[in-house]
Amino acid sequence: MLSKFQIFKIGFFDVAPHLLSVIPFGIIFGAIGIELGFDPIMTYATSLIIFGGASQIVFLQLLSGGASSLIAITSVGVINSRHLLYGAVLSEYLNKLSFIKKLFISYFIVDQGFAVSNIYFKKNKEQNFNHYHLLGSGITLWLCWQISTIIGIYLGSIVPESLGLKFAIPLTFIAIIINELRKLDHLMVMIVSGLVATFFYNAPLKSYILISPLIGLFSAYLIIKFKK
Amino acid sequence: MTWTSIFIAGLITYFTRMGMVTLIDKDIFNENFKKILNYVPSVVFPSIIFPGVLLDDYGSLVAITDPKICGALTAIIIGYFSRNVILTIISGLASYWFLIFIF
């Protein structure tokens, strides 16, 4: 049986490769915040309080562009609504934790952390202290996001735009779901979700990120029905 | 006003994170729903990947010859056979940079 610290470390090592995209993205975000005219404390506060990369950029861009607070806040809510799905998946594994621990650990649920910890949970259902994996991955991502935001705020765009490091984000997500490509049903669902997201990308309030997973899940439901 | 917006946006985001974890009892999910939840990574991540590869900064489709498409395909092929996360990301970036800087 692994100790809490060992599981925490596995979480750290599992998520470490994804820092390749998280750190440049954090730096870019910090620099964008300042470029858009927000002061350093306010830019950093979004990393601490909202802690959701893409939604933070959209939030600051909308506010600086003169959009109403309501639009900016709604956009953040829509973009981050995917966490509801992550929570639904993880609730099965975090069920035994106390309410306070659930409240604490929830703050650290982000894309990459969810992805690697969900894989670990599936493989190690019998282990105690599995939630330390989510803490390991989540706290690692949190720390890197906070530090890289501060670096971006004070050093500006030290990541040259010509490197196109934004492209590292879809690449890390490809790495996350690559094993699911081996399953035909998952492949079909991926193509449906991806194409719907591309088609609805310009929908208001970035709602494509809500529409495409829902249509994807509906297609998964049809596949499950058809399999029966 | 901006500070209030940041706090409200943060609160909503936190609610999206903790809502399902704290308020939902796993026993209310039936077997079919649990099966559907298995597909969550397969529906959420392609929703980020496809636009990230197929669209430019202005939300228009890129050309079929765009370096991002080549980079993504390289990452998929290398990732599929190697099953290695770092190799997948690096190979995608390397082929992307190769096309941008060498060609």
Image: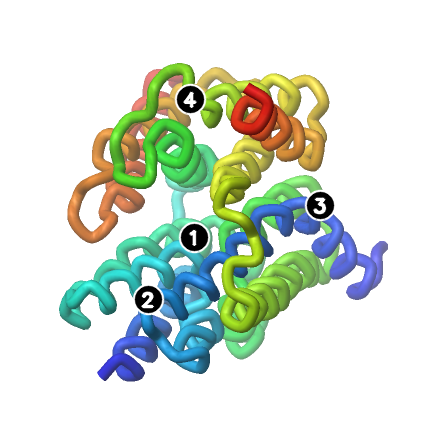
Mark 2 and mark 3 lie on one chain; the one further toward the N terminus is: 2
Amino acid type, label 3? Asn
Q: Secondary structure at mark 2?
A: loop
* Residue closest to the eye, A97 or B3: B3
Q: Which of the two discs, 2 and 3, sits closer to the camera? A: 2
The Cα–Cα distance between marks 3 and 1, rounded to whole angstroms, is: 18 Å
Q: Position of residue A175 (x, y in %)?
A: 59, 33
Task: Pinpoint the chain carrying mark 3.
Answer: A
Q: Secondary structure at mark 4?
A: loop
Task: Tell me the residue that label 4 is attached to.
Answer: B66
Residue B31 visible in the snapshot:
no
Amino acid type, label 4? Asp
Classify 10 Å Cα crowding around label 3: few (below 14), some (14-19), many (20 and above).
few
Q: Position of residue A191 (x, y in %)?
A: 37, 23
The Cα–Cα distance between marks 4 and 1, rounded to whole angstroms, is: 37 Å
The Cα–Cα distance between marks 2 and 4, rounded to whole angstroms, is: 29 Å
> Which quadrant of the structure image shows residue A218?
top left
Residue at point 36%, 73% (across, down): B10
Task: Tell me the residue that label 3 is attached to.
Answer: A124
Report if the CB atoms under discs 2 and 3 are less than 8 Å apart: no
Residue with the most extreme front position: B102
A126 with respect to B80 (left or right): right
Residue at point 52%, 19% (across, down): B73
Residue at point 32%, 40% (across, down): B57
Task: Tell me the residue that label 2 is attached to.
Answer: A36
Amino acid type, label 2? Leu
Classify 10 Å Cα crowding around label 4: few (below 14), some (14-19), many (20 and above).
some
The answer to whether marks 2 and 3 sit on the same chain is yes
Report if the CB atoms under discs 4 and 3 are less than 8 Å apart: no
The Cα–Cα distance between marks 4 and 3, rounded to whole angstroms, is: 41 Å
